Amino acid sequence: MKKTALGFLFLLAACATSTPDMSNMSAEELYNKGYDELERTAWSRAAASFEKVELEHPYSQWATKAKLMGAYAYYKDEKYDDAILSLDRFIRYHPGNKDIAYAYYMKGLCYYDQIVGSEKDQEITTKAKEAFNQVIVRFPNSKYAVDAKQKLVLIEDHLAGQEMEIGRFYLSQKNYLSALNRFSAVVNNYQTTPQIEEALYRLVEIYTILGLNDEASDTLKVLGHNYPDSKWCQMALKLRS
């Protein structure tokens, strides 16, 4: 899955003060050190500085900001598990914070950027879907909801693609009932994806093989009504002629 371009969320920060000994830094100095390291794309060092704010100054105003900024640093460093842990802490302890929608959105990105090919397990894809749905439900009017909806379109297509991949495998093995279940799942759950046309054709194909002519004819009618110009429709017509 292509990396997502993420506009950096700038939080208030004063100019950093260079201090050689981190153990003597105040919460603000540590936070600003992390901020400067982010600007230099030193993601790992930035995350360490923000973590230090949380550990050494947990009740300061900077600790709240550091949770989110640390999560961002981990995200950029592709340490997604650490980023998600930081985001979960932020969400748990600061549900009313002005940046809470961003935290939910970034959690979705952490999963989204780990999505793998449709031939592999899609647990991460499902988690990305759940996370972006949270953004849409909780913050429907936010700018993050707009992007979450766009990413959900791609996620749905990806999940449908996996169902199709497995369905084709079962079909090649003449395991018709298992293939039927997979293609039916696409028809029932992913109707807005490009996979729907082939899924309908595969149902016609399997019903024909199984001698279920009424079901094959009914499915062909659906395919012909909705996608009359599709190559899959033309193939289904030839199959049933």
Image (cartoon, grey):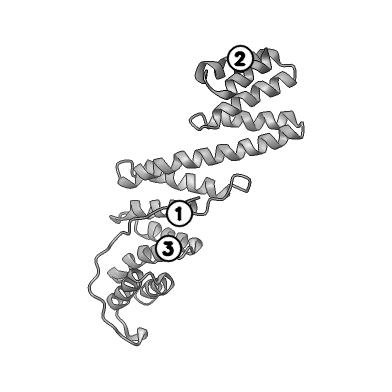
Counting from the top left corner in percent of width and height, residue 81 is at 50, 61
Q: In the image, which disc is placed on residue 150?
A: none
Quick check: 95 left or right of 236? left
Q: Which quadrant of the view contains residue 8?
A: bottom left
Counting from the top left corner in percent of width and height, residue 37 is at 35, 73
Q: Secondary structure at mark 1?
A: loop
* Residue appearing at x 40%, y 40% in the figure: 149
Q: Which residue is mark 3?
A: 76
The earlier-in-sequence mark between 1 and 2 is 1
Q: Nearer the viewer, residue 85 or 197?
A: 197
Residue type highlighted by circle 3: Lys
Between the residue at mark 1 and the residue at mark 2, the CA separation in whole angstroms equals 42 Å
Q: Residues within 10 Å of mark 3 (few under 14, many from 20)?
A: some
Q: Which residue is mark 1?
A: 3
Residue 221 vs 18, above or below: the answer is above
Between the residue at mark 2 and the residue at mark 3, the CA separation in whole angstroms equals 50 Å
Q: In the image, which disc is placed on residue 218?
A: 2
* Residue appearing at x 26%, y 77% in the figure: 16
Counting from the top left corner in percent of width and height, residue 108 is at 44, 51
Q: Secondary structure at mark 3?
A: helix
Quick check: 2 left or right of 65? right
Residue type highlighted by circle 2: Asp
Quick check: 30 left or right of 75? left
Q: Secondary structure at mark 2?
A: helix
Counting from the top left corner in percent of width and height, residue 68 is at 36, 62
